[in-house]
Image (cartoon, rainbow, N blue to C red):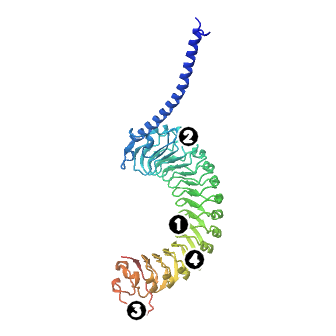
Amino acid sequence: MATNGWSPQLLVFLLCFYSFTLIVVLGQMEVTSALISLSNLTDQFTLLSFKSLVTRDPYNVLSNWNSNISFCDWNGVLCSHGSQRVVALNLSEKALEGTLSPYISNLSFLQILDLSSDSFHGHLLVDFICLPLLENLYIRKNNFEGLIPQTLSHCRSLQILSAGDNQFYGSIPQLLGSLSELKGLNIRGNRLTGTILPELGSLTHLWILDLSSNLIEGTIPLPLANLTKLISLDLKFNKINGLIPPNIGSMNRLQELGLFVNALEGSIPDSRYQLVRRSNLYLEMNALSGPISTSINYPMNLRVLYLNSNNFSSGIPPALCELKNLIWLYLQDNFFTGELASDVGNLVAVDKMDFSVNQLSGELPVSLSRLQMLEYMNLSKKSFDGNIPQQLDHILNLDTIYLFHNKLSGEIPKSLEKLQHIQVLDLSFNLLKGEIPSGGKFANLSAESFLGYYAPCGAPKFHVPVCSDGAKKHNNVNILRVDIFLA
């Protein structure tokens, strides 16, 4: 029988239809909520898996990682505001020990992972394919080993990769050249072998590149000069050979270049000196040769220059003495010749200077007295002659003077007693004569400093003959070793 023109079949159909529609709408909301809850549970279980593999937690950092509070409030955990997903895990410098759970890859919203300066070990078994949002990965100063994971190439948003001071081995992965957003790459202090890949030259956003302290061989690839935003390039302590690339001058933002303790040879290209922004240049302990370019006067911002332990020859260019911002100058253990120019007094900011073990000669310039900031001076093992300038007492900050193995003559200037900070004064193996001063800091010197060596005369505490007026005035020349160290 019809009811208001509606058949019973139609009523049943409409009831079923609207009931189904209501179930679908409510179900979608519940499914969405369920998925969020499931994702949150996944993050929580992942963090608990991480905790389960930590074998030592001396500061109890993970003590609040339990079900009593939300995982978003756990130490070191940062969640997004909306979905409450883990976006950052920062447990650096917490002295945590253990292995890294491979399930960390389930934190699919993770942007920052910082485990630096801990003691994690073992292989890095994280599947980085599942971490597409990762921007910063800090795992330096741990004991991770094995190969650098190939799956890192899927982290297209990665900006910082800091994996230095671990035990990674193998060659530098070619995949790193595909991480176009990288700004910082630090894989120093590992056991990486092979060569520097030309593909690294495509990382044009890179600011810092540190491949130092590995076992890398081969030459510096020319494409590396494409890194025009680079501020610091550190390749020290490797086995890199060949020439310094002539186009390296195109890195016009470079402030620090570390190439020391390699097997580089040839001369320094002029373009290398034209990097006007650079402040630190470390080229020591290679096999570089030839003269220092006269164009070295261009980088007026240069503050640190290490050219020691190479095969450089010829004279020290006067332009070098115009670097008035220079604070450290190390040219020792080369084959430089000629005299030390009086222009050396223009290095008014220098506080450490070492020209030892070269073939320099002539008298010590009086202009050294203008180096008011100088604390360390080493001019030993050369052929300097003449007297020690009395004006050295003007360098009030001096604490170390090495002048041994020269041909210096005359007496030790009594004016050196005014040096109130002197800790080491070595004048051994020269042609000095006369009285050893005993005032000022000389009064604190140890008698053992003169054992086994003949000193013409001095205070009784030095175990040498007491000076008489005749002894002070005699003209006999003796070999005098004066090794002065504060007791």
Residue 344 image label: 4
| Mark earlier in primary sequence (2, 1) | 2
Per the image, label 2 sits on a secondary structure element best described as loop
Residue 132 image label: 2
Left or right position of 464 against 90: left
Per the image, label 4 sits on a secondary structure element best described as helix
The percent position of residue 408, horizontal first and vertical second, equals: 49, 82
Residue 471 image label: 3
Q: Residue at x 40, y 94 (%)?
A: 469
The percent position of residue 462, horizontal first and vertical second, equals: 35, 83
Tell me how far mark 4 sits from mark 1, CA to CA.
21 Å
Tell me how far mark 3 sits from mark 4, CA to CA.
36 Å
Does the CB distance between marks 4 and 1 fall below 8 Å? no
Residue 133 found in image quarter: top right
Number of the front mark, 3 or 2: 2
Residue 309 image label: 1
| Mark earlier in primary sequence (4, 1) | 1
| Mark earlier in primary sequence (3, 1) | 1
